[in-house]
Amino acid sequence: MILSFILLSFRTLLIRNRLFTIINVAGLAIGMACLLLVGLFIHDEYRFDRYHTNADRIYRIVLDYNSDGVNTPWAKTNASFGHYLQGAYPEIEQVVRIRKNPGTDLLSTGQTQFYEERIFFADSTLLRVFDIKLKKGNPARLLHELNSVVISESLARKYFGSSDAEGKTLRLNNQLDLKVTGVMEDMPVNSHFVSDAFITFSSLTTLLGEKRLQHWGQFDHYTYVLLARGAQPELVEEKFPELLKRHAPAWVSEKETFLLQPLTSIHLHSDRKDEITPNSQESYSHILGTIALAILLMASANFVKLSTAMQLSRSKTISIQKILGASRIQLIGYFWIESMLVCVIAWMASWILASLALPYFNITIGKQISLLDGGWIILPSFAVAAFLGFLSSIIPARQAQKSNIVEAGKLKAHPAGRSGLRTILTTTQFSISILLIIVTLTVTSQFSFLKSERPGFESERIVIIPVKDRSQNDRHRVMVRELTQLPDVEAVSFSSSTPGNNNSLTYSYSFPGTESKDRAMATFLVDENFFTLYHIDLKEGRFNQGEETDTLQDVLLNEAAVQSLGLDHPIGQRVTGKVKGKIVGVVENFSHTSLHASIEPVIMYAYIPTFRFVSVKLRPGNTPEQLASLGRKWQELYPGYPLEYSFLNDQINQMYKAEFQLSRAYTLFSIIAVLIAGIGLIALTTYFVTQKHKEISIRKVFGSSSLQVVMWLYSGYAKIILASILLSWSLGYYWMQRWLSSFSYKTELHPSYFLLPTFGMLLILIVTTGAQTYRAASINPIKNLREE
């Protein structure tokens, strides 16, 4: 019996209803492939940092810094806290501090030199906390020797080729010779920090000085602890204030609060100042997962609707099976086998589709996901396919049970307009499609806005060059003059930070005569050319002279700082703390962080030793030739340091990388959803036309034209379209308003974002159903009425 049902199912699916089978398999395969890809994405997101053996016992120490009532959550801490924490409590087995210099570091050996982004300094306890696999070197002696370095296999090949790197020497920033004492495997990409080299932490004494490493207000380092088994992090945190009282100055306890953050929560739940790398957000996984499930549900709904439509043409076969003695259980088994065959074929096709789409999906989301890592998903995905096969067999089986043997070929069904389930499914599909297009248009518009909007400053044709040799900062005016003499250069400025790039420094200041004491503020250390180059407008007073003096420094504030400090007459106001000076000018607000955040108070003055960037504004022209000319001049000014540059616009756009990737994913899934919705409309029209063919013929006999019949058929969609529009517009407006509220600078929701998707889906409705509808209206009524 089972074999005969399988043969009959194959005959029905592959011969009699080949087109419907192809549509069903394609729709389900696309839906399951989307779920597979998103499932792999979510799995990758949640397994960050979990490859460490003791991941559940590793915590990062983070810092909440309170300054004049303003709390700043830092991912970094000072070096002193980690130093005193080692061995202080039995609950803490190991402490490791790591530091990454801002920007890049120059590594060289012989004539080979490159700027590297992922160079870290680390304590010798690194391998006792983190699982870092060694290829060469003695783990017991690693990072103990002064000025030693452990490098990755990739870095070893890059600098030493096929020769053994152990014992060789690398030079750091033309300042320090480092002996290679070990080679490690490349770190997994699913880590919240990935390093190509770890340098002995004690080498920082030579580079930075002991005083800076002992400063409790210098947040330069990331500190991690390995807790003992059974230790409770809450109880460990309660002991930190006591440690501060014993070793730190009195002011530290008042301003700094140290907390333990689980290692495995960093990637999805941490958004602190100066994260090692930009983290993701758990909401991205929720959103993509919801969309993928919605697409699979749409595909499943299409399967059910097409199966129902096919049922009308199979009523004679079912009646014959009943006459031959097929029982209710056997009919249910037959329809279950048939549905399972479709779902299993679709399941296998989904893996093929997923493997073909995966390279493009990785590019879209910026990951390196592999199906080889997704073995865990095989059984769950098959279970989903089996469950869909079971659900989709229920309705056809129930209809078959209710069919009247005498009325073979006249299997009754609820009219499409009165079928609640079918209407709900189609309305949901239509709504999701419109909603996703609304989301895509809004997100695309917002990120186009971010790409072009630069509140308070200009960024076009500005090249940012990091200064690696600050020993020449006292010659910055000479450098500016030399660079400005290049015919392709319009303006040059030295500064510690750049607008819109979230790289400002943070220091504390006091303003005598006001209530603000030790106020932490974003700090820009700039020369006199900075404001002209970036077109930052002066509100009142004058710009600074770009010079340090032995008396009072020229200080400027932005409007947000003046408002925050409550300064009615800021010009002439004294400033103490990190700088001793007086306010000489107020500039208009300009964005110095992400456009997610509102404008913060900013203080600006000149401090030449901390100038770490050169901003070069190019004239319109041939950019490659301009950069080549700039590179030659740079080598003259800074011998031994090749030109390293990036365009400011590119740096700013990098801050929104996750959102850009999410935008592309939305677009991709919107296209898929529209495709699935189109299949659903074909299914609904097929069902609708099939059950209405006699009524169509009767209407034509009584004088209705083909156009009138077409309009009557389309009227069946009126309620569906109206309900879909109201639902999608309401959800889209609420969702997008809430999403846009996370940006301080945002585009407005334009009516076209709602009208265009609606008109687009109506066009798709006409295109996908037009041929069937017109054919049904044009058919000779005698043919259908003769069947009665």
Image (cartoon, helix red, strand yellow):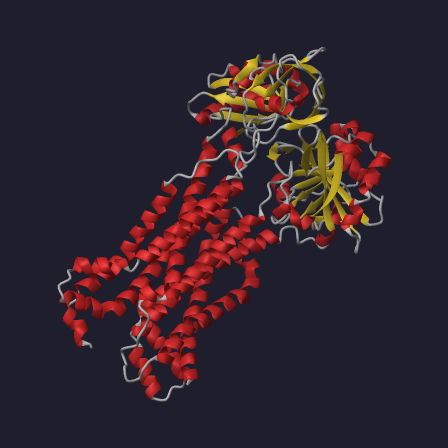
- Which residue occupies the foreground of this view, 120 or 512? 512
23 relative to 498, above or below = below
**Horizontally, is 414 left or right of 251 in the view?**
left
Quarter of the image for the C terminus: give it: bottom left
Quarter occupied by residue 333 = bottom left
Quarter of the image for the N terminus: give it: bottom left
Residue that appears at 15% across and 65% down: 700
Work out whether residue 569 can be spotted: yes
The image shows residue 684 at horizontal and vertical percentages of 32, 63
Quarter occupied by residue 574 = top right
- Which residue occupies the foreground of this view, 328 or 664? 328
Quarter occupied by residue 179 = top right
The image shows residue 496 at horizontal and vertical percentages of 62, 24
Residue that appears at 31% across and 68% down: 415
The image shows residue 506 at horizontal and vertical percentages of 67, 28
131 relative to 582, above or below = below
Q: Residue lying at the far right in this picture: please name it.
A: 246
- Which residue occupies the foreground of this view, 696 or 496? 696
Residue that appears at 35% across and 64% down: 23
- Which residue occupies the foreground of this view, 114 or 110? 114
* Number of on-image labels: 0
